[in-house]
Amino acid sequence: MKLRYLMLALIVVVSSSLLFAGTDRPAPHKEKTVTLYSDAKVGDKILPKGEYEVKHVVEGQDNFLVFVSGRKEYRFPCHLQPADRVESVSVHFRENPDGTRTLVSIMFPGDSNAHVF
């Protein structure tokens, strides 16, 4: 009888942990679409204007955003910063003195973290 209750408790705990696992974690490998209407600097590279499928990739402790347009792929390291959830894709730029723009962060609907470059 005790074994039956122990097994039932174990099933409830495992089911609950699977149900709530990663609730506030980013969704790696989940693709989103982002359109850039002008070229943007990301780190020391230029991301050309255009429409991109963006994928968050986690490798060990490292986070990356991968921008894919056609056959071209751009991969940038990022870190996650807690932020309020947004209802649509939120892209933040910094205007540079030379007239260029630097991509500072991106946040996707449903995430509780901003991807900061």
Image (tube, rainbow, N blue to C red):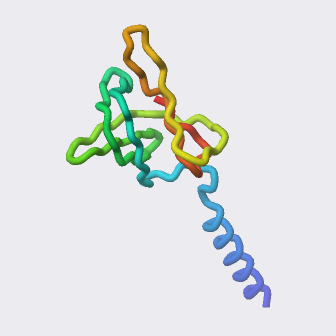
Q: Position of residue 20 (x, y in %)?
A: 65, 62
Q: Nearer the viewer, residue 72 or 90?
A: 90
Which residue lies at the image location 47% right of the left edge and 41% below the top edge? 61
Identify the residue at the far left of this view: 71
Identify the residue at the far bottom of this view: 1
Quarter of the picture holding the N terminus: bottom right
Q: Relative to 93, does residue 99 appear above or below in the rendering?
A: above
Question: Along the horizontal axis of the image, is 3 left or right of 25?
Answer: right
Which residue lies at the image location 38% right of the left edge and 23% below the top edge? 43
Q: Relative to 67, does residue 10 appear above or below in the rendering?
A: below
Question: Along the horizontal axis of the image, is 67 left or right of 6?
Answer: left
Q: Relative to 96, does residue 113 appear above or below in the rendering?
A: below
Q: Is residue 77 visible?
A: yes
Q: Place residue 59 in its image quadrant.
A: top left
Question: Along the horizontal axis of the image, is 9 left or right of 18?
Answer: right
Q: Nearer the viewer, residue 110 or 1?
A: 110
Q: Position of residue 16 (x, y in %)?
A: 68, 69
